[in-house]
Amino acid sequence: MTQPSPTYLLIAQSIPSDNDKLAQLRPLLAQKYQLDAYILGQRLIGRGPNLIAEGTREHLTDIAALLTEQDIPCWVIEARPPRFAPLRLREIRIDPEQMSLTTDGRVVILEPKHRVMAVLADLSGQAAEKNLKYLMAQRVYSGIQDSRPLGDEELTKAILRGEPVLDLYRFNDQGRVDAGVRVLPGRFDPSGLGEHAGLSAIGNLKTILDLVRNHVDSFQLVLDFGLANLPGCRLKSPEDGLHWQRDNLAALTCFGWLMAELSPSVPHSMAPGAPPLSLLEALCNELGDDMPDAPAPAQTPVSLPQPPTADRTHRSAGLRLSLSIAAAMGFGLLTASGSDVLTEALRLGQRTGMLPGLLTGASLWAGFHFLRLKQHVENTPTSKARSLAMGLVELQGRAVRKYALISPVSHLPCVFYRVRKYRRDSKNRWRLSYSDDSRHVPFYLEDDTGKVTIDPRGASVSAQVRQESYGGQASTLFGSIGNDADEKWVEDIVVEGTRIYLLGQARENRGPRPSLREKVTRALQDLKRDPEAMREYDRNGDGHVCEAEWEQARISIEQQVLHQSLAGEYSQPVQSDRVVVGRPRQRSIPFVIAETESETRLVRHYTLLILPLFVGALGGLVWTLWSLKHYLQP
């Protein structure tokens, strides 16, 4: 009987923030090795080691070589279960030459020559949640490029404030773990600490950590339990069942052994004698023009303003009208379904050919719609942000936030979101009960020449990232979205930094400007609220601005505002705000915002939609003629 081939894991060390090399590598890995580009971005940016892929050693080695070329440490290791769990510490004794850790089954001796790896973890999940909130807060106001996770010092403090556990792993001369000790606060006799002992159980645990750090020559501290995405290491919460703490201890054991596997091993490196052409360039050449060059990462401002408030007056009226029509149609169908009227109408429509005729017309309309859209995409030349002409334009680049916009369910920094709420009815079917999006929030599209403002109102937005959350489940990053199990939330997101394609109309950005009188009125109001400025117009120094002095102040303010307005008219606005791309004035011209890596892939997507629609229309036409023939026969 043949032994099954072992499974190997590719684990990579995350980097603090995104960069242009990683942004170029993600779509290449997605196409060549069928990896999800969005998940790669989530696991390669942050802190801690993360699982990238599973498979054979040969397959993972190729991916690891590409990651290593981009200065990302990674390891290819065999997936093996832990050999044993760390034994619980009961007593400690400190001597000048050694430390004796008495456990349930043995005494573990630590000498200066030993190499020790310590895993400090929080079983409550508070430290992991704080790191995520800290990271998301930076992304909201600083952008993806400038965000950084918690440092070791801040994360250590957060772990000690939760439910900390300390695992110590001792390595032998061959670099293998030969002993493990688990330190639980308040579960050991602290008298052996001598003068270092204190009244705080958490303080005594930290004392052991510091003593071990200072006692051995080779020491490594790991703080990433709960932050790393590794097999068998998921951090659970009380909502996961009664035994969540026991499961977290088992996951901590699995995490410790994985870190022990990575600790003595050398990260994957390039084989000697590699050709001068880099692996990334070779992969780009292999994939061809379907994978365009990635521009430099977006430079997001240090602080972003809050998103503007949506004007929902017109939208609400249209929504109420649509809901009224839908309710009337639904009531009619439900009333008809109580009798045989609906069934008889469907049979009559099928016999006379009306029903297949309607299906044929709908398929033809949809097919020609996507065909016209495909032709617009193919025939419109790609423009650059810096040399944008007015009229119909096609742009490709990265989506960059103009406002501090985050998605309401998953709390990700994004340039667009669409969220829908569904409720389960009496027949166990999901019914749409609420819908909202961020079409009123402009954003930037940035390429290698600059960036331009995008107004997404009226656009057909195609997002690749979809998050689903059910009532009572925790959202992706924060808290829960509700306790009703009959609710479901679906969220489509265009995450900041992703590559998008845009087809729309460019026009000069002429926003509403206040009149000269409004500017003067506002300046006079500001003058009245400023006592120091009012004293400048008190000519006689009596502490009161008389009517004549106020008239002089008014004339002076008018002249200042006039000079400022004239200077402002000749000053050039910021290049990114000078032009805005939005919905074309002609409704027949499409306005498309699609999250895609290239125009070729978008055209291919439209082609795959057109073919089945026309085939369905042809089949519907045959069905219509056949039904009509049999109906007209005497």
Image (spheres, grey):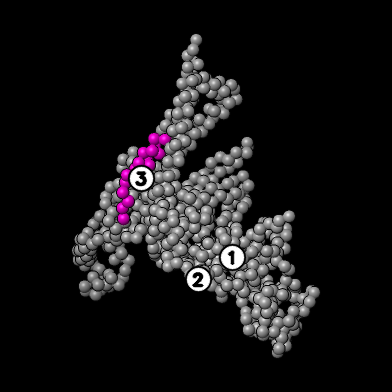
Does the magenta segment cover residue 379?
A: yes
Q: Position of residue 210 (x, y in %)?
A: 64, 81
Q: Give the number of the mark in front: 2 or 3.
A: 2
Label 1, label 2: how far apart the Cα atoms are: 18 Å
The alpha-carbon separation of the residues under discs 3 and 1 comes to: 43 Å
Q: Secondary structure at mark 1?
A: strand
Q: Circle 2 sits in a helix, a strand or a loop, which is it? A: loop
Task: Determine whether label 1 and label 2 are within 8 Å by CB.
Answer: no
Please name the amino acid that badge 3 sits on. Answer: Val
Q: Which residues are magenta?
A: 367-384
Q: Are marks 3 and 1 in contact (CB under 8 Å)?
A: no
Circle 2 residue? 272
Which amino acid, mark 2? Pro
In the rendered image, residue 274, in percent from the top left (x then y), is placed at: 47, 68
Q: Is residue 521 visible?
A: no
User: Residue 21: percent from the left, percent from the top?
Assistant: 44, 64
Q: Badge 1 is on which residue?
A: 76
- Residue 377 numbered mark, or none: 3
- Residue 143 lies, with reference to residue 426, above or below; the image says below
